[in-house]
Amino acid sequence: VQLVESGGGLVQAWGSLRLSCAASGRTFSRYAMGWFHQAPGQEREFVAAVSWSGGTIYYGDSVKGRFTISRDNARNTVYLQMNSLKPEETSVYYCAGGGRAFYTGKYSSDYDYWGQGTQVTVSS
């Protein structure tokens, strides 16, 4: 099983980026997918999660109204549209999937599979 993130990079403050996470090796159509981020010396933090059907979505408090998570089960891919980015959101962003079928979690322990991470740098 592989989760491969893409779309990270350098952006100016208040700019936008769109992250993608492509899954291979199994289908995640019965499982939630999520995004987390981790800055150096910090714990991994929840960003957003989408249920297996796309019908339930959760966001971390700091990104509500600016980030949008979505998924395409036919492509086994999850996306994170990030708008109005702030310098303090410079971090490595990780895609996560799996865990308990039909359950959408907000904690790292809710997910079995992780991508390698993609760096997002927001300059001031």
Image (tube, grey):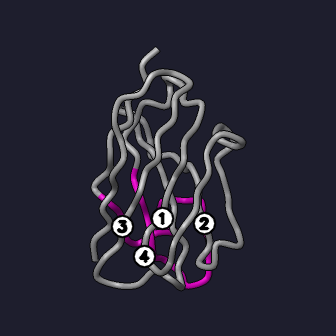
Mark 3 to mark 1 CA distance (whole Å): 7 Å
Which residue does the numbered mark 2 point to in the structure image? 50
Point out the tag, 3 or 1, that comes first from the N-terminus.
Answer: 3
**How far from the left and from the top, in percent, is residue 44?**
45, 46
The nearer-to-camera label among 2 and 3 is: 3
Identity, as a three-letter code, of the amino acid under mark 1: Val
Q: Is residue 10 left or right of residue 30?
A: left
The reply to whether discs 4 and 1 touch (Cβ–Cβ < 8 Å) is no
**How far from the left and from the top, in percent, is residue 90?**
42, 30
Identity, as a three-letter code, of the amino acid under mark 4: Arg
Which residue does the numbered mark 1 point to in the structure image? 78
Mark 2 to mark 3 CA distance (whole Å): 15 Å
Kindly identify the residue that appears in the image at 41 percent across and 57 percent down.
20
**How far from the left and from the top, in percent, is residue 91?**
40, 35
**Number of the label disc, if any, that sits on residue 22:** 3
Q: Which residues are magenta?
A: 94-115
**How far from the left and from the top, in percent, is residue 124?**
47, 14
The reply to whether discs 4 and 3 touch (Cβ–Cβ < 8 Å) is yes
Which residue does the numbered mark 4 point to in the structure image? 75
Which quadrant is the N terminus positioned in? bottom left
Point out the tag, 2 or 3, that comes first from the N-terminus.
Answer: 3
Circle 3: element type = strand
Relative vertical location of residue 44 with respect to residue 32 in this rendering, above or below: above
Q: Residues within 10 Å of mark 1 (few under 14, many from 20)?
A: many
